[in-house]
Amino acid sequence: MDHIEAMKASKMHVPNPPPSQLLNLETFVEFDSTIDEDQHNLMVIKFKGCGGTSVTDAVGRIMQKIVTNELGTKISLKGMGKNNFNFSTTNMMKCIKEGCMLLSGIDVTEQKVEHAIGEWLRHSGDRLKAELEKKEKQKKHK
């Protein structure tokens, strides 16, 4: 019996899963503030299940599931510059780090996870630009 089924069987609180992607900072902050111990444990398990061949790959797989590129442009690891939101102090950060630390077969440390998250957020603008250019190109070919 998996963790969720065990909680259901014991009539424990089964937390709501996170939205597929958090679209704006308000939604992110609101969701992050609701992460309790049960939610944390479920998210760690979910994030571990994303897998990855490296820390960078694992973090990328997780981040793209929870944060849009547009939202990523408003967040940075430490909240430095451009009035960015500080991701390092969030409950989500803790869940991602723990999920990655449980991965086997890759050389993972907290420092590597933090660095990979910072880089993913830093490059959100580049991915957003490419995404928008792709959409514009598709419009022209219709």
Image (tube, helix red, strand yellow):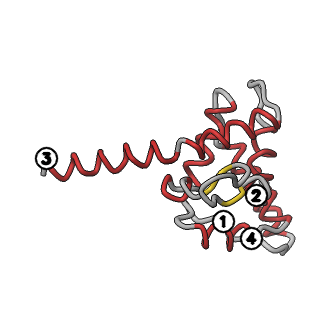
Q: Distance between the residues labelled 2 and 4?
A: 8 Å
Indicate which disc, 1 or 2, sits on the residue closer to the N terminus. 1
The answer to which quarter of the image holds residue 55 is: top right
Q: What element carries label 1?
A: loop
Identify which residue, 67 or 58, lies in the foreground. 67
Instruction: Name the residue rendered at 60%, 67% in the picture.
Output: 25
> How dense is the environment of label 2, judged by Cα within 10 Å: few (below 14), some, or many (20 and up)?
many
Task: Check whether the beta carbons of the residues at disc 2 and disc 3 lie within 8 A of each other.
Answer: no
Identify which residue, 85 or 50, lies in the foreground. 85
Q: Provide the residue designation for mark 1.
A: 17
Which amino acid lies under the numbered mark 3 shown in the image of this protein?
His
Q: Which of marks 4 and 3 is in front?
A: 3
Which amino acid lies under the numbered mark 1 shown in the image of this protein?
Pro
Q: x and y percent of residue 92 in the render?
A: 73, 57
Indicate which disc, 4 or 3, sits on the residue closer to the N terminus. 4
Q: How far apart are marks 4 and 3 (CA)?
A: 44 Å
Q: Is residue 95 left or right of residue 137?
A: right
Indicate which disc, 2 or 4, sits on the residue closer to the N terminus. 4
Which amino acid lies under the numbered mark 4 shown in the image of this protein?
Pro
Identify which residue, 43 or 95, lies in the foreground. 95
Q: Provide the residue designation for mark 2.
A: 42
**In the displayed structure, would residue 91 be above or below residue 121?**
below
Task: Check whether the beta carbons of the residues at disc 1 and disc 4 lie within 8 A of each other.
Answer: yes
Q: Distance between the residues labelled 1 and 4?
A: 6 Å
Task: Check whether the beta carbons of the residues at disc 4 and disc 3 lie within 8 A of each other.
Answer: no
Q: In this view, does 78 lie to the left or right of 81?
A: right
Which amino acid lies under the numbered mark 2 shown in the image of this protein?
Leu
Indicate which disc, 2 or 3, sits on the residue closer to the N terminus. 2
Instruction: Name the residue rendered at 59%, 40% in the picture.
Output: 60
Q: What element carries label 3?
A: loop
Q: Provide the residue designation for mark 4.
A: 15
Q: Which mark is residue 141?
A: 3
